Image (cartoon, rainbow, N blue to C red):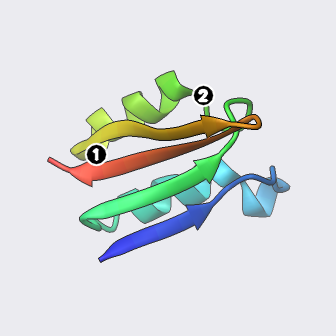
Amino acid sequence: MVLQLDLTKAGGCSDNPLSRLISIIKENIDEVEVTTTPEIIPQGLAQLLGNRYGYKVGVKTLENNRIIYVFKKS
């Protein structure tokens, strides 16, 4: 099962996209597709989080200032 997460809108303190992403990948889901922008979650940060929580991170699409990161459990 692939979980799709849309983080294209930067939320406030209670709905921080980075916090939402971290809580999802801590659940050890096999694959997560995260739609966001490089300003909200830069590629380097996505790679760092993937390494920290045991995921390989790939970039599926990059267009119209949107990026899809694919986190796959390694």
Residue located farthest toward the right when viewing the structure as drawn: 12
**Label 1: element kind:** helix
- How far apart are labels 1 and 2 at the CA level? 17 Å
In x, y percent, where is residue 23?
Answer: 47, 62
In x, y percent, where is residue 40?
Answer: 71, 38
Left or right side of 9 for 44:
left
Q: Residue at x 81, y 54 (%)?
A: 9
Q: Residue at x 60, y 52 (%)?
A: 35
Identify the mark nearer the N-term, 1 or 2.
Answer: 2
- Amino acid residing under circle 2: Pro
Q: Is residue 23 above or below residue 41?
A: below
Per the rendering, the mark at residue 10 is: none
**Label 2: element kind:** loop
Q: Are there few (<14), some (14-19), or many (20+) residues within 10 Å of tag 2?
A: few
The residue indicated by pointer 2 is 42
In x, y percent, where is residue 43?
Answer: 52, 27
- Amino acid residing under circle 1: Tyr
The residue indicated by pointer 1 is 53
Along the line of sight, the residue nearer the viewer: 11 or 42: 42
